[in-house]
Image (cartoon, rainbow, N blue to C red):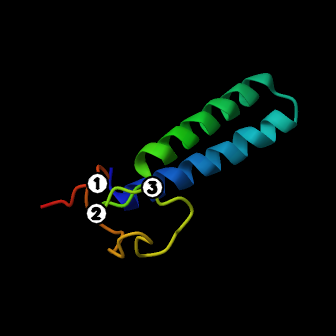
Amino acid sequence: MKYKTWNKLAIILLILEIIFGYFFISGSRWSGLLFLILMAVSIVSDLLFNRCPHCGRHLGRSGGPYCRYCGEELDEGESNGKEQK
């Protein structure tokens, strides 16, 4: 998964977590279950896909335009640690 695609997916997951979290707080059991499932999906997908497309290291919450480990720009490439050719 490309870095930009991952960022869009992360934003969508965050919005859904906020919506279901609100309904969970207001007392809905099903939305609470969905909230917990979305949190688990968000954590697992972060660990799998939030990686530098060049060196493959986990980016954490860096959010910058460049990888803090290898210094390459974070806009294109595969997320498996290999450069796209």
- How far is the residue under mark 1 from the one under mark 2? 5 Å
The residue at the point 71 percent across, 47 percent down is: 18
Task: Name the residue type under label 3.
Answer: His
Task: Name the residue type under label 2.
Answer: His
- How far is the residue under mark 3 from the one under mark 1? 10 Å
From the image, tell me which residue sits under label 1: 81
In depth, the one of 69 and 8 nearer the eye is 69
Within 10 angstroms of label 2, few (less than 14), some, or many (20 or more) residues?
many
Q: Are marks 1 and 2 in contact (CB under 8 Å)?
A: yes
In depth, the one of 55 and 43 nearer the eye is 55
From the image, tell me which residue sits under label 2: 54
Task: Name the residue type under label 1.
Answer: Gly
Tell me: residue 78, above or below residue 68. above
The residue at the point 22 percent across, 56 percent down is: 82
Quadrant of residue 17 within the rendered picture: top right
Who comes first in sequence, dot 1 or dot 2? Answer: 2
